Image: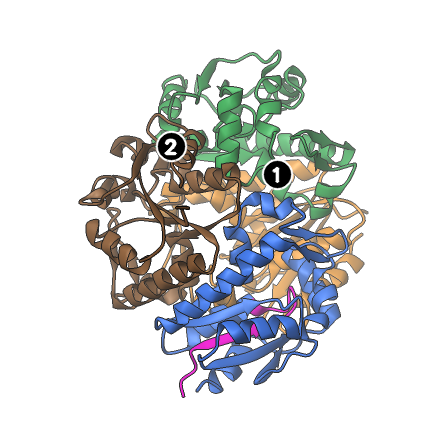
Chain colours: A green, B orange, C blue, D brown
């Protein structure tokens, strides 16, 4: 079979979007990125400051409400339809709910050939990179580093702690059906 | 019926994304933005410099190739599926093909309640705003100002030449089913 | 004499940076932009959340502390030295202190030929554009629209309420010595 | 003596701006960033496409002309004046001219206490990170990795190939007078 969707899951500052860009550069066909960060940007600004939307706590926590979840669920259906219509898609997500998040994606992507990839990074290193990026709330990296992987099943895991994004991308590319 | 999708079509620098943000601010429910600019960003960087991708000519022209068109077609299906799954969506597009572009959207959005909105701006004014933005290729605004509307049928047209984005958004909001 | 520095003062969302880009496009020589927004970005992220730095209140107010003021004062000296060294400079500032802010610039720019420009925009229109931009705290535009001009003396005032940035830039360009 | 200016020199994608943000986070006083990239952004857009400005060749080369050099020289004077006025400044530059670039900075910063830091990164790794960033012309990292250090004298060198930005920042911080 031929892989139609690559799902990358990892905590904030684990290096997912760098891997996405490297995958887009090394894979022979064009792949479309579908990032949770882009979904958040596509939402009304008011949702970023609302109980029903998405809120970032001072210690790096992320709370999402009902309005956010509804748009997110519809987005997953949209990503799946994009793939079914023939576009290769790389999902770049943060499974705040661990295995529950994966189940939601599994339902949405039913029938598609999916490669599940865990993107890990040692918590302390991710926290350092969060400081170096300078555009993320402090504490998100550490708070998500382990929790997003809880109960999630992968075809492949990569670890950016000591491996460059491009090398991680090559490992993933080598596993594509 | 209840409007499920708002499609904004207009040339570069006509003020579409400003209207999108205003619509998101004034409409009572959360609406998701689906912008052609975001699609381009989600594509591999290499497509932005390839014959099969999207290329910007020195005089503001835009050429799109087969790889771009395939991803774009799949994206339209994804946007439609997102709306069918219950998210309200505002499409922010540039109909490079005029009525042909509209037909593609009509097919993809079949069965959904769509409000078609033309976003106009006098060519000279759009060209001025292109300079003021500073992040767009010079010439795109003028070259697209008229052509993107050729043969396109609208429920409503707004003109940003002398009307602020928020007022345009309010006119559109007043027409929602 | 030959104008060496253009100082634009106006409230948030009055359209200053658009005018800067248009000035850079229409003026025959290269002019360097020196924007207060760029200064804020050049400061440590921690100053954006500190009593001694710069803080934005929920209603659009801006509070600056001692650390911010010290860096800002040094920055003004730097801008003046840049101009004295031969670069033409366009300052893009928000005179939170009105005439007091102007006096500080006058001291720093002593001996240089300066064109003082007030950039006005009706409060309600600036507030609308703030919504359309989507990247500014709500309320800043309205709260600053009048106050930043208090007691400030200008060589020229432009008003973006009904005039495009490029036309404002042309009026300014026509006044250069 | 007390260090007043830290000058970081290194090739594109060597990791300088990440180190700047980490330095700003770990140093006890507020330090201002002065980056060559910000200077380029402050220039007229037309200079980015002009023989007298700055041009990027398809293979990652960078050509700068007379207008660019004049603004750059004035900028160095401005940075020096900012430091003399009391602000601690971190310069983030790419010495395209190697030792010649350093001499220009030495002249401008005369009388100030400067810490000269070389930021190195193995060429292949920097090239990989360039792909992962996705916003830089391909080839710049490799073409600059060695040349920018030619003949330059440092107080300290850090290497981001196997060391995180925050650890590099801590090494630099430990050397401040």
Dot 2: element: loop
Q: What subunit carries mark 2? A: A
Dividing the picture into quadrants, the one containing residue D110 is bottom left
Which residue lies under the disc numbered 1?
A: A39
Q: Is residue C12 magenta?
A: yes
Is residue D170 shown above or below A145? below
Kindly give the residue lying farthest to the left in the view shown: D151
Front residue of this view, candidates A19 and B45: A19
Dividing the picture into quadrants, the one containing residue C111 is bottom left
Chief secondary structure of the magenta portion: loop
Q: Residue at x 33, y 62 (%)?
A: D72
Q: How many marks?
A: 2
Dot 1: element: helix
Kindly give the residue lying farthest to the front in the view shown: D1
Spot occupied by residue A63 in the image (x, y as percentages of width and height)? 72, 30
Tell me if mark 1 has few (under 14), some (14-19) or many (20+) residues whose alpha carbon lies within 10 angstroms of its own. Answer: some
Q: Residue at x 62, y 13 (%)?
A: A150
Tell me if mark 2 has few (under 14), some (14-19) or many (20+) residues whose alpha carbon lies within 10 angstroms of its own. Answer: few
Label 1 vs 2, first from the N-terminus: 2
Residue C160, can we see it?
no
How far is mark 1 from mark 2, CA to CA?
24 Å
Span shown in magenta: C1-16
Relative placement, left or right, of B21 versus B143 is right
Q: Is residue D170 magenta?
A: no
Which residue lies under the disc numbered 2?
A: A29
Spot occupied by residue B87 in the image (x, y as percentages of width and height)? 71, 39
Relative placement, left or right, of A158 versus B77 is left
Front residue of this view, candidates D116 and B145: D116
Spot occupied by residue B102 in the image (x, y as percentages of width and height)? 58, 53
Spot occupied by residue D61 in the image (x, y as percentages of width and height)? 24, 50
Dividing the picture into quadrants, the one containing residue C102 is bottom right
């Amino acid at each position: 079979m031929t892989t139609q969707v690559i799902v990358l899951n990892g905590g904030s500052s684990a290096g997912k979007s760098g891997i996405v860009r490297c995958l887009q550069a090394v894979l022979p066909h064009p792949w479309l990125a579908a990032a949770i960060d882009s979904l958040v940007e596509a939402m009304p600004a008011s949702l970023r400051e609302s109980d029903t939307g998405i809120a970032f706590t001072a210690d790096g926590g992320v709370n999402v409400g009902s309005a956010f979840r509804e748009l997110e669920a519809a987005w997953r259906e949209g990503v799946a339809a994009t793939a079914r219509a023939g576009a290769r898609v790389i999902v770049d997500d943060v499974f705040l709910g661990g295995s529950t998040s994966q189940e939601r994606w599994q339902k949405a992507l039913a029938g598609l050939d999916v490669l599940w990839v865990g993107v890990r990074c040692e918590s302390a290193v991710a926290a350092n990179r969060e400081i170096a990026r300078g555009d993320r709330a402090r504490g998100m990296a550490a708070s998500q580093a382990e929790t997003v992987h809880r109960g999630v099943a992968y075809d492949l895991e990569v670890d950016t702690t000591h491996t460059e994004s491009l090398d991680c991308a090559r490992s993933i590319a080598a596993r594509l059906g």
